Amino acid sequence: MTQDPRNAEDAPEAQDGPVYFWRETHPLTGYLSQWYACPFRDPGEPSKTYKTAEHYMMHQKALLFDDPATGLEILRAEHPRQAKSLGRRVRAFDQRRWDAERLRVVARGNYLKFAHPAVPGGVESLRLGTGWGPGGASSEAAGSPLVGAGGLRARLLATGGRELVEASPFDRVWGIGYREEHAEGVGREDWGENLLGRALMEVREIFRKEDEEERAGAEGEKQMQKKQKKKA
């Protein structure tokens, strides 16, 4: 039986079916979309703000092919659809080179999206499952639960070890080429590459390791303090 991705937050570790996502407007899985409105920055380039992960992807694509003018247009684009369209116009584009770099670029963009939101004080003003909109909120999201600081990162981690699958019927590279309701009816050998899902799972694993290291460091500090108290 196919697991319902809308229940992913209930008991993610207890469920082993895939978490399917696609539209940024989905009330509970939209945050996984490249088009989800969540402005973020790269600490290495704090002057730039990326409205969505799609903006980051297309901007980096432009820079990869030494087209800063198009890159600037992408940053200024109001909607991720515009950013995508501009990305298709990057000069001196080489498909083979892009194929070699694209997964790294998208994984990095999503890491930044979840780890470095640009909204002051975190992502308190963003709402789960919003459609695209300035500042990450839209009228469509009225009544949606608010995401606290670090909330998107926590939600990604809450998917546990479940497979993340972009169920786009129109994309066999970043998605699987099938809607969720059709995905289980075909063999996995017929699925597309699901590169976005793979990138998100890579980011999730990085966050998991970061948290493990932080816990280990905190425990080490606690043990050190105990030893110092005993010596005193």
Image (spheres, helix red, strand yellow):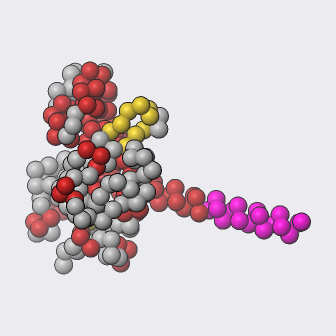
The location of residue 216, given as percent across then percent down, is 62, 62
Image quadrant occupied by the N terminus: bottom left
Q: Is residue 17 magenta?
A: no
Q: Is residue 171 left or right of residue 150?
A: left
Residue numbers of the magenta segment: 216-232
Q: What residue is at 21 percent from the left and 73 percent from the top?
A: 4
The answer to whether any part of residue 73 appears in the image is yes
> Does the magenta portion include 227?
yes
Q: Is residue 207 left or right of residue 141?
A: right
Name the foreground residue: 190 vs 204: 204
Res. 165 in view = no
Question: Residue 113: horizontal and vertical position, in percent?
Answer: 36, 47
Residue at 15% across / 55% down in the picture? 168
In percent of width and height, residue 127 lies at 29, 58
- The part of the image, by quadrant, that contains residue 141 is bottom left
Residue at the spot 21% in from the left edge and 26% down from the top edge: 90
162 versus 108 height, above or below: below
Would you place residue 173 above or below residue 72 in this image? below
Foreground of the two, 156 or 75: 75
Q: Is residue 80 left or right of residue 145?
A: left
Q: How would you classify the magenta stretch by its main secondary structure?
A: helix
> Residue 37: horizontal and vertical position, in percent?
27, 48
> Where the C terminus falls, by quadrant?
bottom right
Residue 133, above or below 93: below
Seen in the image, is 44 located left or right of residue 1?
A: right
